[in-house]
Image: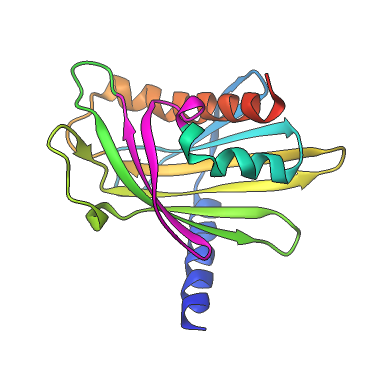
Amino acid sequence: MMRFSVLAMLMCATAAQAAERQWQLEREEDGVSVYLADVPGSKYKAYRGVVTINGDLAAVQAVQEDVAGSCAWIFSCQQQRLLETKGDVSELYTRFEMPWPVKARDSVIQVTTQTDADGSVTRLLKAVPERLPEEKDFVRVQRVDGQWHLKPLDGGKVEVTYEVHTEPGGSVPSWLANSFVVDAPLQTLQGLRAKVEGR
């Protein structure tokens, strides 16, 4: 009961934060809409990407849960592996490529999955950087707050929303930070759609 209460509070807090942000449309390309929002106390913007995929909810979930194949569609992903799964909570370790001269990043993310009353699926994303010792060749991402929201639509389609705010750690040039918050949701959602639709 305590675990459920904590999870419910976390879900509500994340939803409230997302609702409070002042999202501005930044780009529309290839059926993907990308929105950005300022985050108080952070120099990095939050991003939100939205796309409609031809396929059912189970197909989208299957691609997301195929950890071995995840780097084929996640932007900048070099390697990802599953650390642990307990019930609806999983932990993932991911390495990300960065353009020279920026040092590569890695992250440990806790993913909490919940099925909503309307049949939608929400996956909460939260960094747990202390879960593993830091690697000498990587800068550990210290903060990630985000979510995936998968909403079934009529006609065998799914609306996918991908929303994240991250503190990448270390030094990141402004040009890279500004491009990342657009490229990450855009290319990740394009890749996810291509995998689900078999493109």
State left or right for residue 1 relative to residue 149. left
Q: Residue furthest bottom?
A: 1
Q: Main secondary structure of the magenta part?
A: strand
* Residue in view at x 47 percent, y 66 percent: 10
* Residue in view at x 68 percent, y 23 percent: 31
* Residue 104: x %, y % from top left: 24, 28
Picture quadrant where residue 45 is located: top left
State left or right for residue 10 relative to residue 28. left
Q: Nearer the viewer, residue 90 or 191?
A: 90
Residue range of the region highlighted in magenta in the rendering:
71-97
Q: Residue furthest left?
A: 136
* Residue 196: x %, y % from top left: 67, 31
Picture quadrant where residue 170 is located: top left
* Residue in view at x 62 percent, y 27 percent: 195
In the rendered image, which quarter contains the C terminus? Answer: top right
* Residue 117: x %, y % from top left: 73, 64
| Picture mark count | 0
* Residue in view at x 36 percent, y 32 percent: 79
Specify the color scheme.
rainbow
State left or right for residue 114 relative to residue 14. right
Q: Nearer the viewer, residue 92 or 2?
A: 92
157 up-or-down from 117: above or below: above
Picture quadrant where residue 24 is located: top right
Instruction: Please tell me whether residue 143 belongs to the stretch shown in magenta.
Output: no
Q: Nearer the viewer, residue 107 or 179?
A: 107
